[in-house]
Amino acid sequence: MELGSETREDESCHRYGYQTTHRRDAQFFRSKGWYAKGSIRPQTPRNLAISLALEASEILEHFQWRETVKDKGELASELADAALYLLQLASVLEINLEQAILEKLEINKTREWDQK
């Protein structure tokens, strides 16, 4: 990619601190035409949120009827899928995910947690 030819997605990944992962993810989506008008897989917040939920359910499958992970490599792949959808959703909505996480950690410090 030439200097100065960055898209909004590329600019947001610089701002949000996950440049390499997001850039490769966005390049993959562009190569498939998923950012194009009329795409069969439009990268809308709704579609990304649904995809994130579906990937989260695939993570749960690894724990259905067992307490330990049978195939850590397969679980890692599902975790990566979920993380990529989360990063893409934050980018499309122009949410600084790192900042949101840090702010949430500060809020959690002040919360009362059950001690049971």
Image: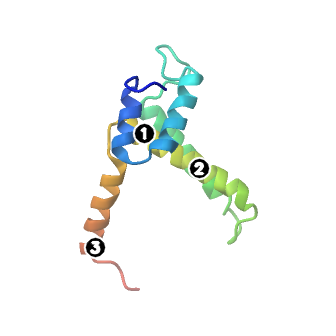
Please, is residue 61 above or below residue 31 in the view? below
The label on residue 80 is 2
The label on residue 37 is none
Q: CA distance from mark 3 to mark 1?
A: 26 Å
Image location (x, y in percent) of residue 48: 47, 36
Extreme right residue here?
Answer: 70
Extreme bottom residue here?
Answer: 116
Q: Residues within 10 Å of mark 2 (few under 14, many from 20)?
A: few
Residue type beneath disc 3: Lys
Which numbered disc flags the more N-terminal residue, 2 or 1? 2
Q: CA distance from mark 2 to mark 1?
A: 14 Å
Which numbered disc flags the more N-terminal residue, 3 or 1? 1
**Residue placed at 66% from the left, 63% from the top?**
63
**Residue placed at 46% from the left, 14% from the top?**
37
Which image quadrant for residue 64? Answer: bottom right
Q: Residues within 10 Å of mark 1 (few under 14, many from 20)?
A: many
Res 49 visible: no
Residue type beneath disc 2: Ala
Please, is residue 52 above or below residue 101 in the view? above
Please, is residue 33 above or below residue 80 in the view? above
* Residue ID for mark 3: 109
Colour option used: rainbow
Extreme top residue here?
Answer: 38
Q: CA distance from mark 3 to mark 2?
A: 28 Å
The label on residue 89 is 1
Label 3's element?
helix
Please, is residue 111 above or below residue 28 in the view? below
